[in-house]
Image: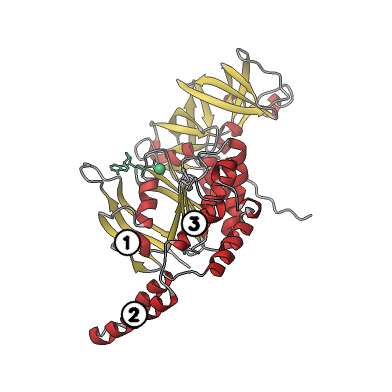
Amino acid sequence: MASIEFEHVKKVYPGAKKPVVPDLNLKIEDKEFIILVGPSGCGKSTTLRMIAGLEDITGGTLRINGKKVNDVPARDRDIAMVFQSYALYPNMTVYKNIAFPLKVRKLTPKEMKERIEDIQEKAKTKNLPAEEVKRLVEKASKEKHYSKEEIDERVHRVAKILDLEEYLERKPANLSGGQRQRVALGRAMVREPKVFLLDEPLSNLDAKLRTEMRSQISLLHKKLNTTFVYVTHDQTEAMTIADRIVVLNKGVVQQFDTPRNLYERPTNKFVAGFIGSPEMNFLPSVVRMEGKKAYLEIEGHKMDVSDSLNRQGALRALDGKTCDFGIRPESITLVTSQNIHSLEPERIFKIHVKIAEYLGYELYLYFDFAGRQAIARVPSKYLIQSGDDVKLYFDPNKGYLFDPETTSTVAFPAPSEEVRLDV
Ligand SMILES: Nc1ncnc2c1ncn2[C@@H]1O[C@H](COP(=O)(O)OP(=O)(O)O)[C@@H](O)[C@H]1O
Ligand SMILES: [Mg+2]
């Protein structure tokens, strides 16, 4: 049971001029699975390490379960962390690796009894509040000595969840990458922590295994029913496993939202470009207001966007300005003899395909457009090759527009269709 709350948290590394994290405000609910995603160096690991207590907090307040923990040392936070380099003990069996965190804590039942008596005595003489006494007793009881049977029971329980029972007597060298990563997870799980922190735990695995482990970690979260905070630079990984995702850039939260909202309603150009693969196209276009009509000028074409991008009148303030028109590669339509008669000519552009990439079910077309590199995804049944000239249709109903100064999203596409299956 643990919520995690950042209140104006700031982190400046010693000797650094600028903070890595200037002013972080974030509330992670109990039992939630949260992903922190952002480019390399944006402060993800730093944020995670502050939760773990491995990194000091320069300013602000960090609360775990409502309690301020700024000065609580890592070992008293009841948190487990799994890293990219899982650092198993090579000479120990899987069993011993998993059991290790239980063995380093070693108060025997007799010592435990004495410790608790000490605390109660101290509480009387110093008149400590009941809350504090409870905390000290709880803390002491976590340092208990686990009997052989208890250890055995816990290791087997963890091994069963992670499907490692057959490998308990093996050494790490004789395991696959995925199995090793599961042992590292087991080692974190065995103490039954309140919070799991995972820092790029799958980065060392090959693509196929990564996909497999992704769903396993998601299942693990459901089984353990505790708070997970997971860091990755990979937006696909983030989109596939989280309930909610925090998009970070330069230590600043850009958006904290569901995967669907990040993809469909990005708050700014950074999120729009970061989420989705291949990346959204950003095409420079000039906004023209003419009475009640709104137009976008792109490459000599004048597209009427009165009923699309300017639905809510968002473009009025941008008259005459060059803005980024954003359109995802999957929202661009290939013009064919079948559809050309139903498409508005002003939205059709002739382009030269620099590279056509065949991906089985679709083609990626790379082309230069309005001085930018652009990409379209089209069905692979169309026989298009690098060097071909084709026509593409840009639908402003599927586009975004970003404010040139603030980079905030000023206009969104019409909401996409959502279908509830009824079979
Ligand atoms: N111990 C440290 N001392 C000084 N600077 C650090 C330290 N650790 C990380 N940094 C810097 O802080 C920034 C954020 O690092 P980090 O949190 O590791 O980013 P991420 O995990 O998102 O890649 C980087 O510019 C990095 O160089
Ligand atoms: Mg990192």
Residue type, label 1: Pro
Q: Position of residue 292 (x, y in %)?
A: 48, 39
Which residue is at a point 37% across and 42% down the rendered structure image?
42
Relative to 303, is 77 above or below? Answer: below
User: Ligand 2: does it lie within 8 Å of the C-beta at label 3?
Assistant: no
Q: CA distance from mark 2 to mark 1?
A: 18 Å
Residue located beneath label 1 in the image:
73
Which residue is at a point 61% across and 40% down the rendered structure image?
209
Relative to 16, is 358 above or below? Answer: above
Q: Nearer the viewer, residue 236 or 416?
A: 236
Q: Residues within 10 Å of mark 2 (few under 14, many from 20)?
A: some
Relative to 82, is 346 above or below? Answer: above
Q: Earlier in the sequence, mark 2 or mark 1?
A: 1
Quarter holding the C terminus is bottom right
Which residue is at a point 38% across and 73% down the rendered structure image?
140
Question: Do tag 2 and tag 3 residues touch (Cβ < 8 Å)?
Answer: no
